[in-house]
Amino acid sequence: MRDELLKLMPEFDLLEDAELREKTLQCWELALTEGGWAPEALLEMPFTLLINPCPANFIEHVRGVTLTALRAAEVFELIYGERLPVQRDILIAGGLLHDIGKLLEYTRNAEGKIVQSYGGKLLRHPFSGAALAARIGLPIEVQHIIATHAGEGDKGHRSTEATLINHADFMHFHSLLRQAGG
C-alpha cells in the first residue's frame, strides 16, 4: 500500500521531517483501511460529489492543492521573507491530508457508484479527517489545516498554512466547477 501511495503522490518526498512524513503516510494508510479503499481506486474517485461528472480525480486534486499552496508559500518567501513565515512541512502535510476524511465520507453503493456514506452524512470530511490525524499523533497544526480547510473553518481562526490550503482548495474547486459547466 505504501509503495503505491508514494508512486501516486510524489509530494510525500517534499516532506523534510522524517517523522512528519511517516505519520502523514500512516494517516493515509489508516484512512484507506478504515474506508475500505485501495490506493488505485483513488484514481477513479471524484474529488467532489458536487460536480457531476467530476473532471478531476481525488489524487489529482490532493496533489494540485498541495502544490498550489506550496507555490504560494514560495511567493510569500520571495516577497515578504521572514515577515510572513510559512511552516513548509506543516503546509505540505496539511495539503496531502486536507481531504483525507473523504476516504470515510465516500463509499461505493451496490451499483458501484461512489456516493456519500452514512457516516459521511453525519460527519463531513474536515471532522473525520482531523480525527484520523489526531489518532496518528500528527501535530495540532496539521489537524488545524484539515479541520479548517473547508467551509467549517470560515467562522474561526486560520493559520497562514491553513489559509493557503483553504484558498488553494477553493481555487481548484471553483475552476473545475466552471470547466464542468457549473
Image (cartoon, rainbow, N blue to C red):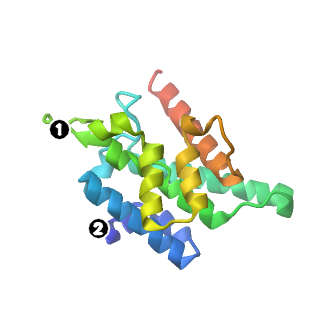
Q: Which residue is mark 2?
A: 1
Quadrant that contains the N terminus: bottom left
Q: Is residue 100 visible?
A: yes
- The structure residue drawn at horizontal position 53% and vertical position 47%, both measured from the top left corner, is 147
- Asked whether the residues under the numbered discs 2 and 1 touch, taking CB atoms below 8 Å apart as contact, a structural biologist would say no
**Secondary structure category for the residue under label 2:** loop
Counting every numbered tag in the picture gives: 2
Q: What residue is rendered at 22% in x and 35% in y?
A: 113
Residue 6 image offset from top left, x and y in percent = 40, 68
> For the point 58% across and 52% down, which residue is it?
145
Label 2 neighbour load within 10 Å: few <14, some 14-19, many 20+: few
Q: Quadrant of residue 15?
A: bottom right
| Earlier sequence position, callout 2 versus callout 1 | 2
Percent position of residue 78, x then y? 81, 59
* Residue 170 in the figure: left or right of residue 49: right
Quadrant in the rendering for residue 152? top right
In the picture as drawn, the residue positioned furthest to the left comes out as 110
**Residue where numbered disc 1 is placed:** 112
* Residue type for callout 2: Met
- The residue nearer to you, when weighing 150 against 88, is 150
Give the residue at x 34% y 39%. Answer: 120
Please provide percent x and percent y for residue 118: 27, 36
Which residue, as the protein is rendered here, is positioned at the far top? Answer: 182
Residue 40 seen in render: no
| Label 1: how many Cα within 10 Å (few below 14, some 14–19, many 20+) | few
* Residue at far bottom of view: 18
Which secondary structure, mark 1? Answer: loop
Amino acid identity at mark 1: Gly
Determine whether 18 is above or below 57 in the image.
Answer: below
Q: Position of residue 160 (x, y in %)?
A: 71, 52
* Mark 2 → mark 1, Cα distance in angstroms: 22 Å
What number is the disc on residue 38?
none
